Structure formats: structure tokens, C-alpha cells
Image (spheres, grey):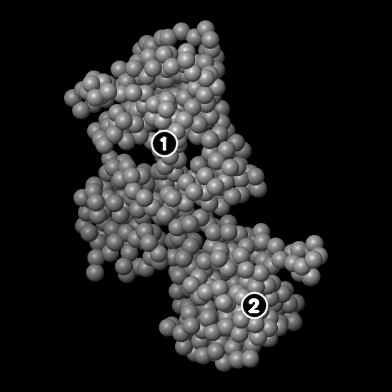
């Protein structure tokens, strides 16, 4: 059976091309061996279920008893009362493992009888662990739905108390408990006494910190590409492609697999940098649950939305703070980069930019581009970027005299992106490359045909910073292997002049347009 790149559900080695995450599994195994109880909370489609399955297989091969379960799909009845949960939970555990460990499943069923309270459940767990004569590990996936239940949180409280008592030599319990989901259960609170009292405690405050990076590194991505290459016989530069995939995805597992899947199944195996660009374009034009979640989480959280606007539209810099931006980090929208808060990856940036371009306020200010002008913008299959920018300059000078100053200053970047979008429609691709937020810089990299164009967008902040911006653009052009670049400067001073010129900086030709 031919392997495929998988983007739905569990990845398994004999069916799917998979990244070698053995180093991550070794670190998780070290936590289990220490007896840690911990929570793997990562964004959606970040490989949590696949990781748990790999941990389970490793544990089983090392002689552990593994109760690998999920409460998703069991129905609400299980969490309706203490009696319902305690009388059924061991049966749920047994059902989840009977396919690979009949003896342990039968042991769980044996001690499930007459268990109707948390006290009785605690004693039953002790007996199961003692009689198994092996170390027992409990894995619970998809805990998000369960975490809304007071009954489930009370169950975590039972596990916490047993963990503490076992540490004092007063009980026997699971060697390790691993929970997986989107939310961090450690932040949830449970009333320990009467509900009318204001004394609360976390049922999972014993949880060890889980700081293992579950995103894919470039080397890990290459391990999957090498496996693909070995299986198919298709040759390409795996190092270059792995680094390019990482550059766009920042190792987000779903995005890496989806790009590879598109290249393999829809792009005739074009394993080139251009093939990655084409795959990303196709991906952004297709609906996916992940993309819908990203937009939904931005629109449903005004704080996240405000920060996204500040980063992407205003181009401002924010220091990384996991407490101030916890929701956006939890949803996978934000991450840390050298102490700064940034959008998690370039693909999410483009998704959000495309969504922003559809906002009514920006649609109303889009530059009208006629079919005749489109022909003038494209010559012999290449973009006439000089002409494109001059046309945009004319538009901005005309409209700026009639429109609200603050609107243009805050929306300038989006207006330019909305302007260039129909010119590239169907044949081109662009992505945004934030360089340094300190000087309000933003580079737009345009791919059209086999050519690349770098346009730096910059807010005027004085001649000194302008000269520095020129040097930075020249340096970036050198990195990209290009001899020409474009500098689009938004100057909102009342005395500004309408200028454009070619200048040579450090051996690079720059076309500057002042708006």
C-alpha cells in the first residue's frame, strides 16, 4: 500500500509519511520514568493524538501497562453525577485497551463492580495498580470537553490526592498520568469545600511543566522527506525544501503535512521552492477546519483581534508575555520570537491578511484596476513593478486629499495589499516578511512566474531612518540574491512631495516611491 501525507486524525507509520519525533518521545518517556503527571496542551491539529499514540507504543514495548483513553464520544451521562462517573469510568478504561491488553482490561472490569463514589474509585485504582504488578500509565486524550465538567475536575482531584499520598508512602497509584488537549487544565479551578465558599484550588496543580517543543524542526521535516524520497524514488534537495517548509510553517505539523500532500497529490510532485509557493496558494484558497478556527478565534476575542491588528496593520512590536496573550498563544495564533510576540507562522499571517482585505472598510478603498491597466502592468510574463507603484502613488495622492488622515495611516498596508491582489490574481503569489518592527518596516515578497520582487513598505520617520531603511533593503536583497528592490514610503506629513526615483545603494538598484 502506497503511503500518503496525512492531515486528518491519527498518523500511523505503515500508512503515512511521518516526521521522526523520536527525540521528543524520549523526553516524554523521561518524564514518565520520573513519575511526572503532566498536561500536553497545544493548538488544534498540532499532533497531540499522534504523539500520545507513539508514547503508548513506546511504553508498551518497555513493559508498562498503558490505559489509553478519551472521553470524547462517551456522552454526557458519564459526567451527570458522581455515581454515574465512578460506576462507569473503569469500564470505559477497559473498553479502550481490550484490543491490545486483555488481561489489564479484565482487571479493570473486576474492580469496577460496586464502585459508585470517588472514595471507592480511589481504592479500586489502588487495587488495579497493585495487582497488575507493573507500572501503570494513564493517558487521556481530548480532555477539553471533559474539562467543563465539575465531575471530571473532581476526578482529577482524586488523582492529585493519590499522587501526593503515594509520594508520602501512603498509597499506590498510576506511575504517570498524561492529559492532552487544547486548554491547560492547570488553570481550571474547583471548589474544594461547599460551593458557597470562595476557596478554590486547581485539581491539577501537581502537573509538571511540559515544555517540549512539539513543532517540527527543519531537520525533523527532512526526515519525512527522506522517507518519501526513499519510497518513491523522486529526487530533490531535501535540505532546501525542509528549510523552506519550516520558514513558512514554523513547524506547525498540520501545515507541513498539508503542503507536502498538495505537492505530492495535486502539483505533480513539484518539490521545488516554486512548488511550495504554489501549494501554499492552493492551501489558502481552500477551506479547512484549522483556518476557520484561526479566524473564528480572532473574531470572537476582541483582545486577540486588537493585538493582531496592532502587529499586522500598524506594524508595532510587542514584548512576549504568556500571561497577557495566553488565549492567542493557546490557540496557536501567537508565539515568541527573540522575546517578541509574533504571528505563529507566515501562512497564518497570509490567511489573516487575506481575511482583513475582505473587511468592508478596506474593500471600499481598493484601487480600481482596469483590464487595460492590468495589461500594462504585465510585460512578457513579468511584472512592471515600477509602473504598478507609480499608479498606486497616483491613487494615494488623489484619495488622500479626500479621505480621513487617520484611516490612511492605519490602513495603508492593507490598501496596498488589496491593490496588488487583483494584479496577481490566478498567476502570482505574495507573502509578507516582517523585518524589524522598530522602524515600522514590512517587506512584501511577490512571486510572479519565475521572478521574485521585494517591496519594502515603510512609514516615514525622518531622513536618518530612511537611509537606514535603504541599507536594510539592500542587505535583504543580497540575502535573496536579487539586484533590484522597491521602497514604498508612506509619508503623512502635510508638506510631503510626490517623488519617485531610482537610487543605487551598496550595489543594489532601488526604486523609491514617496506617497
Residue 375 image point, x, y percent: 22, 23
Image position, residue 202 (x, y; %): 70, 64
Please give left or right for residue 5 compared with residue 38 in the image. Answer: left
What residue would you read off at disc 2?
A: 81
Residue 338 is situated, as x and y percent measured from the top left of the image, at: 56, 40
- Identify the residue shown where x is 29% and y is 34%: 425
Task: Pick whichever, 376 or 276, lies toward us.
Answer: 376
> Mark 1 vs mark 2: which is more N-terminal?
2
Residue ID at (57%, 80%): 89
Q: Quadrant of the N terminus?
A: bottom left
Looking at the image, residue 58 lies above or below residue 217: below
Q: Nearer the viewer, residue 264 or 201?
A: 201
Q: Nearer the viewer, residue 502 or 75?
A: 75
Residue 125 vertical placement versus 139 (above, below):
below
Count the labels in the image: 2
Q: Residue at x 50, y 31 (%)?
A: 313
The picture quadrant where one finds residue 15 is: bottom left
User: Which residue is labeled 1 in the image?
Assistant: 358
As drawn, is 59 to the left or to the right of 5? Answer: right
- Secondary structure of the residue carrying tag 1 is loop
Q: Quadrant of residue 431?
A: top left
How far across and how far down the image is residue 218, in percent?
Answer: 41, 49
Amino acid at each position: 500500500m502506497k503511503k500518503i501525507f496525512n492531515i486528518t486524525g491519527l498518523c500511523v507509520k505503515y500508512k503515512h509519511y511521518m516526521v521522526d519525533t523520536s527525540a521528543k518521545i524520549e523526553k516524554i518517556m523521561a518524564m514518565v520514568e520520573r513519575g511526572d503527571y503532566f498536561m500536553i496542551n497545544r493548538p488544534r491539529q498540532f499532533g497531540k493524538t499522534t504523539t500520545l499514540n507513539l508514547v503508548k507504543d513506546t511504553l508498551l514495548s518497555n513493559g508498562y501497562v498503558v490505559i489509553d483513553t478519551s472521553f470524547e464520544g462517551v456522552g454526557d451521562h458519564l459526567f451527570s453525577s458522581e455515581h454515574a462517573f465512578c460506576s462507569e469510568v473503569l469500564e470505559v478504561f477497559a473498553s479502550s485497551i481490550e484490543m491490545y491488553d486483555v488481561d489489564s482490561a479484565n482487571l479493570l472490569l473486576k474492580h469496577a463492580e460496586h464502585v459508585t463514589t470517588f472514595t471507592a474509585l480511589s481504592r479500586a485504582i489502588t487495587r488495579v495498580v497493585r495487582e497488575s504488578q507493573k507500572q501503570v500509565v494513564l493517558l487521556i486524550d481530548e480532555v477539553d470537553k471533559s474539562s467543563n465538567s465539575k465531575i471530571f475536575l473532581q476526578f482529577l482531584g482524586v488523582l492529585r490526592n493519590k499522587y501526593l499520598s503515594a509520594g508520602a508512602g501512603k498509597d499506590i497509584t498510576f506511575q504517570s498520568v498524561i492529559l492532552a488537549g487544547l486548554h491547560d487544565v492547570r488553570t481550571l479551578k474547583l471548589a474544594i469545600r461547599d460551593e458557597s465558599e470562595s476557596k478554590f484550588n486547581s485539581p491539577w496543580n501537581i502537573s509538571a511543566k511540559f515544555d517540549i517543543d512539539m513543532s517540527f524542526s527543519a531537520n525533523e521535516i527532512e526526515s519525512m522527506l527522506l522517507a518519501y524520497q526513499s519510497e518513491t524514488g523522486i529526487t530533490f534537495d531535501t535540505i532546501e525544501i525542509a528549510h523552506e517548509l519550516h520558514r513558512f510553517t514554523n513547524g506547525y505539523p498540520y501545515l507541513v503535512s498539508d503542503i507536502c500532500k498538495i505537492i505530492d497529490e495535486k502539483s505533480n510532485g513539484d518539490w521545488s521552492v516554486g512548488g511550495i509557493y504554489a501549494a501554499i496558494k492552493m492551501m489558502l484558497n481552500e477551506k479547512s477546519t484549522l483556518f476557520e478556527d484561526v479566524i473564528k478565534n480572532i473574531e470572537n476575542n476582541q483582545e486577540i483581534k486588537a493585538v493582531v491588528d496592532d502587529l499586522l496593520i500598524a506594524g508595532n512590536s510587542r514584548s512576549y508575555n504568556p500571561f497577557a496573550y495566553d488565549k492567542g498563544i493557546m490557540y496557536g495564533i501567537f508565539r515568541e520570537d527573540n522575546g517578541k510576540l509574533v504571528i505563529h507562522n507566515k501562512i497564518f499571517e497570509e490567511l489573516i491578511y487575506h481575511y482583513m482585505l475582505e473587511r468592508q472598510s478596506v474593500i471600499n478603498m481598493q484601487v480600481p484596476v482596469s483590464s487595460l491597466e492590468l495589461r500594462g502592468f504585465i510585460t512578457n510574463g513579468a511584472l512592471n513593478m515600477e509602473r504598478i507603484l507609480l499608479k498606486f502613488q497616483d491613487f494615494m495622492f488623489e484619495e488622500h486629499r479626500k479621505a480621513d488622515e487617520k484611516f490612511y495611516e492605519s490602513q495603508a498596508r492593507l490598501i496596498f495589499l488589496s491593490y496588488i491582489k487583483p494584479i496577481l490574481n490566478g498567476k502570482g503569489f505574495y507573502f509578507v516578511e516582517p523585518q524589524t518592527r522598530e522602524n515600522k518596516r514590512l517587506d512584501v515578497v511577490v512571486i510572479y512566474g519565475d521572478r521574485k520582487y521585494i517591496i519594502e513598505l515603510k512609514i516615514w520617520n525622518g531622513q536618518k531612518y530612511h537611509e537606514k531603511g535603504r541599507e536594510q533593503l539592500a542587505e535583504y536583497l543580497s540575502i535573496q540574491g536579487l539586484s533590484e528592490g522597491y521602497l514604498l514610503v508612506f509619508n503623512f506629513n502635510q508638506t510631503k512631495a510626490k517623488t519617485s526615483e531610482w537610487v543605487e545603494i551598496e550595489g543594489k538598484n532601488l526604486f523609491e516611491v514617496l506617497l
